[in-house]
Image: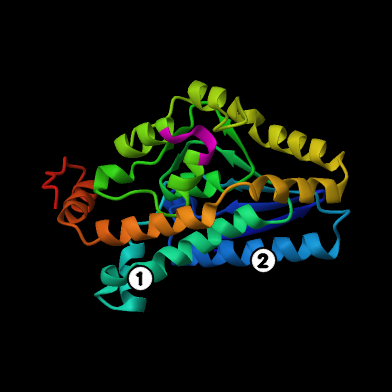
Amino acid sequence: MTTIILNERAPVIEIVLNRPERRNAVNRELLNDLDAALDAAERLATDAPATWRAVILRAEGPVFSAGIDLGAFSEWAEISGESWRDNLFATTERYQRVTNKIEALSLPVIALLHGAAIGLGMEIALAADFRVAAEGTRLQLPESRIGLIPDVGGTVRLTRLLGPARAKEYILTGKPFDLADAERWGLVNAVVPADQLIARGDALAAELADAAPLAVRYGKKAIDGMDDIKRGLLFESWAQAALIRSEDFMNGAQAAMTKSKPEWRGK
């Protein structure tokens, strides 16, 4: 079973995370399939710009995404060797490249969130242009609770959306967002009943389709070009490269797998 489904239903290209048995946790296969689906969406948009007007990013199963699959660490060890944590930059860049590709799509991307968007799942959503959440969705960047930071654009993009003070509150504590606050602050564009989530995404896509295609695409690029996200991503990579080698991360990751409380040592 493919981990990503690409549906063509003009004017929308729909990209669907399809690993429900693992709560759409991101492993190497899903990351690669998402990368390929984004390339396919861009080709469609380039070949028929008047036909394709928006990308909807959603997920099958009970949640949008539970974040990175902890098994992905062993996958990267197979690729880069057991010392992969000593040179994390290549691994971080691989993940960042995919979320950057979401943001860089010429079409606006609408992320439809349900159940939970946690960690890397939240970072994927943050790379979209719009986020619509079903009632009861858990939004969280909990990396600090295992001794890391969000390093796939979450630190940079959350700060861009909410400002430094609120971004620090949620990144440094790792606590979940209250959906009412998330909507009021613009982290999500709307909160809707779960049975209306897809319809709300389609309605937003229809509104985009009523506007001139080139104006939408150039408008998106102009707005996104106002921030120096590349510099921020480099800072994320630098910080994570240090943290991934810390004792605190090892303790935090073990505690997460055993569902126990970690003992922080500050080293």
Residue corresponding to mark 1:
76
- Kind of residue sitting beneath label 2: Asp
- Kind of residue sitting beneath label 1: Trp
> Looking at the picture, how far across and down is residue 94, in whole percent?
47, 67
Q: Which quarter of the picture shows residue 75?
A: bottom left
> Looking at the picture, how far across and down is residue 144, in whole percent?
29, 44
At 40% from the left edge and 54% from the top edge, which residue is drawn?
Answer: 151
Residue corresponding to mark 2:
39
Residue 65 visible, this orientation: no
Q: Which quarter of the picture shows residue 200?
A: top right
At 75% from the left edge and 66% from the top edge, which residue is drawn?
Answer: 43
At 17% from the left edge and 42% from the top edge, which residue is drawn?
Answer: 260
Front in this rendered view, residue 234 or 59: 234
Alpha-carbon distance for marks 2 and 1? 23 Å
Q: Which residues are magenta?
A: 160-164
Q: Which of the marked residues, 2 or 1, is nearer the chain's N terminus?
A: 2
In magenta segment, residue 241: no
Within 10 Å of disc 1 (Cα), the crowding (few <14, some 14-19, many 20+) is some
Report helix, strand or loop for mark 2: helix
> Looking at the picture, how far across and down is residue 199, in whole percent?
71, 33
Q: Main secondary structure of the magenta part?
A: helix
